[in-house]
Image: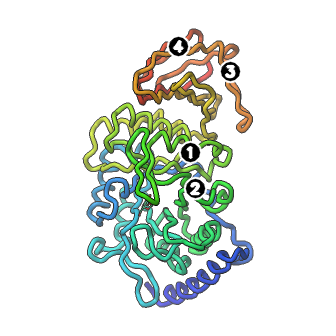
Amino acid sequence: MSKILKSLGVFLCFLGVAINHAYAQGVTVHVAPGTPGKFTELGQRPQMGWNTWNTFACGINEKLIRDAADALVASGMRDAGYIYLNIDDCWQGERDAQGFIHADPQRFPSGIKALADYVHAKGLKIGIYSDVGDKTCGGKPGSRGHEYQDAMTYASWGVDYLKYDWCNTEGLSAKGGYTTMRDALRAAARPILFSICEWGDNKPWEWAADVGHSWRTTGDIYPCWDCEFNHGDWSQWGVLPILDKQQGLRKYAGPGHWNDMDMLEVGKGMTEDEDKAHFSIWAMMNSPLIAGNDVRSMSAATRKILTNRGVIAVNQDERGVQAWRFSNDGQLEMYAKPLANGGWALMFLNRANQARAYRFDWGSHSISDRLSNSSVDFGQTRYRFTELWTGETGDTAKPYAMTVPAHGVVMLHLQAK
Ligand code: GLA
């Protein structure tokens, strides 16, 4: 790095420390007159990609990243939309005498810039991870007091995405910490998607629409249908508990600022029906779709689920309206999501341990949503539909007899005739 860049970094680093202190004390600081905030052109659709954490945790190295990039291309995941290849915690080595962060020299000897070049040459984008505190959750150096310097370093490496965690932040203001990094990213002048990973502790949905492109709404996911994995002072959550924690949050999400239900556990040990349901729920709720399985060795069934174009299109729909539960019959729940061009997605979710036969009588249902100003009266308008997992087609003229698998879904895409 040139001397000029280094001195600029040191200056920005001091500026960052000052701003961080000011925010922690609840003072509003304007970085520079006219600073325009986050990169609003990013995140217009929920981001899609792959992340190292769910399968590899801290066991990562540069060969894994290259192999994952190759696999994202060869498996068709890139072409299905999984563009971001995100390196999670534990890529970091030490800071140097000037405070610049470096990748772990043993596991990333070529450095992140070389990896970014490799990933970009594959038609992918690269993501990295840091933390508001002085240490990450994995005990590596965090960005506290180095925000501007780190943002500049990431930009100089060609990074496109930052996941920013919330460990070791006792006494800090979440809004302050995340806003400091937002401003640092803007000052570094490379459009970097900013993924807030604060687990919902400080209600980021209330303050982060102008700060990041998505915010985690819950603690970490665990590959199970309906469980809590209690670690003592924190828990991981299965698919249904995470869904249930989204109550009341849909009004906060939309293009450029999404509720993030955490990375996908598809292909990580749940049944195929559970994986399909998990993927469908995340799609309906407009959560970012960040796969977390070992893409180098996934089964054909897992690949098929993750690359289901119809389900992905529901997630990526340009209106960006998050689904809501419009009805239920016992453990069978019905969700709706209005789409662009007058289409709708409907999801029938069976929470129960047994398959459920159900007859949906279109004529007796009308669905309306004040938030998105959308409504449909199936008694009035006729739709044709496709079931997005089986390809079965039908028409709303007569009741639809379906069997929803145990821990599974039926997911319909409807288009007016
Ligand atoms: C937190 C995050 C996870 C992961 C780990 C890394 O638990 O919520 O998604 O990034 O830290 O240490």
Q: Earlier in the sequence, mark 3 or mark 2?
A: 2
Q: Earlier in the sequence, mark 1 or mark 2?
A: 2
The residues tagged by marks 2 and 4 sit, at their Cα atoms, a distance apart of 38 Å
Q: Using the image as rendered, state which of residue 1 and residue 258 is in the foreground.
A: 258
Task: State yes or no: discs 1 and 2 in contact (Cβ < 8 Å).
Answer: yes
Say which residue appears at 64% left-offset and 70% top-offset.
176
User: Can you give x and y, in whole percent of width and height, for residue 231 in the image?
Assistant: 40, 56
Say which residue appears at 55% left-offset and 62% top-offset.
194
The residues tagged by marks 3 and 2 sit, at their Cα atoms, a distance apart of 33 Å
Residue under circle 2? 200
Q: Where on the image, by quarter, is ligand 1?
A: bottom left
Q: Secondary structure at mark 4?
A: strand
- Cβ of mark 3 under 8 Å from ligand 1: the answer is no
The residues tagged by marks 1 and 3 sit, at their Cα atoms, a distance apart of 26 Å
Residue under circle 3? 366
Q: Using the image as rendered, state which of residue 18 and residue 414 is in the foreground.
A: 18
Relative vertical location of residue 225 with respect to residue 389 in this rendering, above or below: below
Residue under circle 4? 359
Residue under circle 1? 245
**Three-letter amino acid code of the residue under disc 2:** Gly
Q: Secondary structure at mark 1?
A: loop
Q: Earlier in the sequence, mark 1 or mark 3?
A: 1
Q: Secondary structure at mark 3?
A: strand
Mark 3 neighbour class, 10 Å CA radius: few under 14, some 14 to 19, many 20 or more: few
**Three-letter amino acid code of the residue under disc 3:** Ser
Q: Is residue 54 left or right of residue 286?
A: left
Relative vertical location of residue 327 with respect to residue 19 in this rendering, above or below: above
Q: Secondary structure at mark 2?
A: loop
- Place residue 374 in its image quadrant: top right
Mark 1 neighbour class, 10 Å CA radius: few under 14, some 14 to 19, many 20 or more: few
Q: Specify the quadrant that holds the N terminus.
A: bottom left
User: Can you give x and y, in whole percent of width and height, for residue 295 in the image?
Assistant: 31, 49
